[in-house]
Amino acid sequence: MTGEMEFPAALGRLGTIARARFFDGPTPLEPMPNLTRHCGGGQLFVKRDDAMGMAFGGNKVRQLEFYMGVAREEEADCVLITGAVQSNFARLAAAGARKLGMDCHIQHEERVNNSDPGYHNSGNVLLERLLGATLHSFPEGENEQGADRKLGEIAESLRQAGRRPYIIPLAPDHPPLGALGYVVAAHELLCQLRQSTLKVDHVVVASGSGNTHAGLLFGLRALGSGITVRGICVRRDAASQRPRLIARCGQIAELLEVASPVIEEDILLDDAFLPPGYGLAGEATLAAILRGARSEGLMLDPTYTGKSMAGFIQQAEHSGPDSTLLFIHTGGTPAIFAYEKELAAAVDKFAEIT
């Protein structure tokens, strides 16, 4: 099944690529007046990609529409994915597979040094079990090629048993079909802005695999928008993330059969909130989680949106009164419950945040 929407010619063959529709857009674009007053800078808004309905939503819903579209086109009967123990992508892959009548195999990588039973049993892991996913384990956390190879071995054993597996790969040497979800999101956002007459100067988004950040930036530039996109590093430092994003944009251009509109100067990264590391929350992240909850009722997680909100608040505090900033809420809500101890301690530590 091909995409059902018509897209501008600048987005090449986007409308012809297989896509499974998991939500009816657009996601809400909401003002954040209380956070605006707190930061004292420009006007602040949030795009609620956490509000997509499937299994608690999040940015991976958009990405999975394209992976699962291909899986359905290839008549797969099961989907395989690898990720961290509390992977939002894995949880949503299991949900998407179920909606399409497929099974799901999830490989958990040991990316985060966290021995708390809640981290390994609650949050996304609990939801994966509810969705009936088959869980596997990979003992490393920073070996993308190795994780993909192991996934390939699981897929081969399934083929030998007569199944038709489809692999959603991890390593960056595979075509980033998921990034196309955020090319679509860029088009959606610009349509919303035109309809509301709102002018956004800056967008802030978590930058992890690079698919969300690169897809959004590519889509905006391809459609003629000069809105700056600042990625808050959540997985690796800026020096390591930059070449990944450059490569992603080139791969998107190949998928769409157009020239890449992104130049190196477009890629803005901030790794100040990455410490103490992936899946671990520093003080600024924990404070941002409480600020988002108590100012705007936004639920943010320690791995992705808490860190990106910390970067967003910092940028907002240094912005002029005439600027307008937009936060992309990429979801991750279930992971909150895997960090009960850290968040409970933060409630006590940052009691002054109201």
Image (spheres, rainbow, N blue to C red):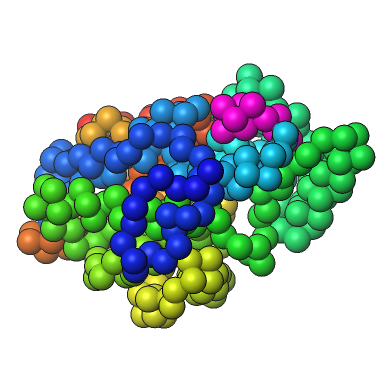
Q: Nearer the viewer, residue 117 or 201?
A: 201
Q: In the orientation shown, which residue stands out farthest toward the bottom?
A: 264
Residue 280 in the figure: left or right of residue 7: right
Please state the horizontal and vertical placement of residue 342, each as a whole percent of the image. Answer: 50, 34
Residue 345 in the figure: left or right of residue 170: left
Q: Is residue 328 visible?
A: yes
Residue 140 in the figure: left or right of residue 203: right
Residue shown at 61% from the left, 47% from the top: 70
Q: Nearer the viewer, residue 198 or 201?
A: 198
Q: In the orientation shown, which residue stands out farthest toward the top?
A: 130
Q: Quadrant of residue 59?
A: top left
Q: Is residue 317 visible?
A: no
Q: Is residue 127 above or below residue 29?
A: above
Which range of residues does the magenta coloring cover? 95-107
Q: Is residue 34 above or below residue 241?
A: above
Residue shown at 69% from the left, 22% from the top: 132
Residue 166 in the figure: left or right of residue 17: right
Q: Quadrant of residue 294?
A: top left
Please state the horizontal and vertical placement of residue 258, each as a whole percent of the image. Answer: 44, 74
Which of the image's four quarters has the C terminus? Answer: top left
Q: Nearer the viewer, residue 259 or 328?
A: 259
Count of all numbered marks drawn on residues in the image: 0
Residue shown at 92% from the left, 40% from the top: 160
Magenta span includes 97: yes
Magenta span includes 109: no
Q: Nearer the viewer, residue 167 or 340?
A: 167
Residue shown at 39% from the left, 80% from the top: 263
Please state the horizontal and vertical placement of residue 301, each as a whole percent of the image. Answer: 45, 38
